Amino acid sequence: MSQSAVGEHHVVIVGGGFGGLNAAKALGKAGCRVTLLDKRNFQLFQPLLYQVATGSLTTGDIAIPQRVVLRKYPKVQCLTSTAYDVDPVARKLVHEFGELRYDTLIVATGVKHHYFGHDEWREFAPGMKTVEHAIEIRRKIFGAFELAEVEQDPEVRKALMTFVVAGGGPTGVELAGALGELAHKTMVKDFRAIDPREARVLLVEGTAEILPAFAPKLRVAAKRHLEELGVTVLTGTRVEHVDAGQVRTRSDAGVQTIPTRTVLWAAGVTASMFGRILVEKAGGALDRTGRVQVEADCSLVGHPEIFVIGDLARLTDAAGVEVPGLAPAAIQQGQFVAKVLRHRLTGKAAPKPFRYFDMGTMAVIGMNKAVGDLKFMKVSGIIGWFMWAFVHIMALIDGAQRVRVFVLWSWKYFTRKIGDRLVTGAPTKTRELRAARPAAPSASV
C-alpha cells in the first residue's frame, strides 16, 4: 500500500491519556491522519496526582496540553470534546460537537472510581483521577488544618484532624504516607493553637494486607514506613458507610464509627461509561470491573478496526499474563497498536501478539521511604525512594516538567518545605452567609 493511502486512512483516538497519546505520537510519525478526542485538553501524569493533592507539586508540573505534545505532526488534530455514542456499522463516532467518520477507532478512555454500589459516598469521599479531584482533596486536607486552628470544641477539632484513606493499594499507601509526612514532618512549626503531629491518619484496607500485589517482605516494609510517619494501618477492615461527619467500618473486631471530616477514596476503580457504550453497540464482553475483553492484538472481538487499550482493556498477553492497569502498560499498548496499524496499511505481516514488558511496581511512602517490586530486584527505604524519583521524573513527557519537578523535589528534600498549600474556593462560612443574605432589590430604570 502506498504512503498516500496511509495518509488517507483516518484514525480516531478517544482518550488522550498514556495509551491514546502514545498511539497518536507513533501514528503521527508514520504520517497517518489522526484525530485525538478527549474531554480534557491535556495529558495528566496520574501517578503523581497525589502530590498535587498534598501540596508538593502544582497541576502544571504533571499535565501538558496534548496539542503541544503533538504539534510537530501536521496530520494529527486534537479536539476537546466528550464522546457519547458510536456506530460500528457506519464507522461513525458521535461527540458533543458533532460526528467523526473513522477507518480505525482506538478507545483509551481509562477508568473512574468505583464505590461498590454506594455512589452517594462520592460527595463525601473524593477519589483521585482528575486535576479537579486533586484540587478538591487539597482543599479538604489543608482546609481541615486551618479550621482546626480556630476550632474551640476539642471533639470537633479531633474530627477535623482525623483523615481516613480508604484503599491500601499503591495510591492509598502513597496518599496516606504523604499525609503522615505533612503532619509529622512538614507542618510541625506552622500552627500555634494546634500541633499537626496530633493528626490521625487511618489507612483502611479490606484485605489482610496492604499492597497485595507486592512481595510479602515489601508489604511489611511499607507498613513499617507508614507507622513511622504516624499512620495507623487497619487491614481486614471494610468501609460500610460514609457521610459528612463520620466513617463506619467493619472488621472481625466489630463495627467502628470514626468521626472525621476528611475521607479520601482509593479503594477501587471501574471502567469508563464509553467502554460500556462501545460493547453495547459493537458487541464483546465486559469483565466484573467493566473492562472490555480484547483480542491478542488489542482489537475488539469481531471488530478488527476497533482497538481498546490502557486501563479500559482486559488483555491477556502472549505470555499468558493479564496486563495490569498501569501507565507503562498503557504506553506499550498505544505503541503496539500503532505498529499493528502501520503494518496493515503498508501491507506488512501482522506483528507478533502483544507481550507486556513488566519492569515492576513501586510505591513511595514518604521522604527516603519507598518500596519497589522490580523485575530485577526488590528495594525499600532510601534506595527505593531515589529509584522511584528517577523513574517518575524520566516518565514525564515534557523536558521542562522534568526540570521543574527535579528542582521542587530537591528543594523539598533539603528544606522540608512545600509551596502549594493553598485552600482555594470560597470558604464554607462565606458560602453560607451569601446564601442566607436577602437578594438586593433590582434597580429601577
Image: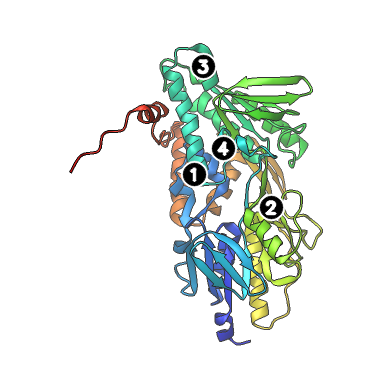
Callout 3 secondary element: helix
Check contact, mark 2 vs mark 3: CB within 8 A: no
Q: Do the numbered discs 4 and 1 sit on residues whose CB atoms are within 8 Å? A: no
Q: Nearer the viewer, residue 329 or 424?
A: 424
Q: Are there few (<14), some (14-19), or many (20+) residues within 10 Å of tag 4?
A: many
Q: Which residue is mark 4?
A: 126
Q: CA distance from mark 4 to mark 1?
A: 10 Å
Amino acid type shown at disc 4: Pro
Is the residue 106 above or below the residue 204 in the image? below
Q: From this viewpoint, is residue 94 visible?
A: yes
- Residue under numbered circle 1: 132
Where residue 160 appears, as percent x and y from the top left, is 52, 22
Residue at point 19%, 40% (across, down):
444
Q: Can you give x and y, in whole percent of width and height, for residue 329 in the image? A: 67, 56
Q: Tell me whether the residue at label 4 lies in contact with that at label 3, contact meaning CB atoms closer than 8 angstroms.
A: no
Label 3 is placed on what type of residue?
Val
In the depicted view, which residue is nearer to us: 430 or 129? 430
Q: Residue furthest front?
A: 444
Q: Residue furthest right?
A: 320
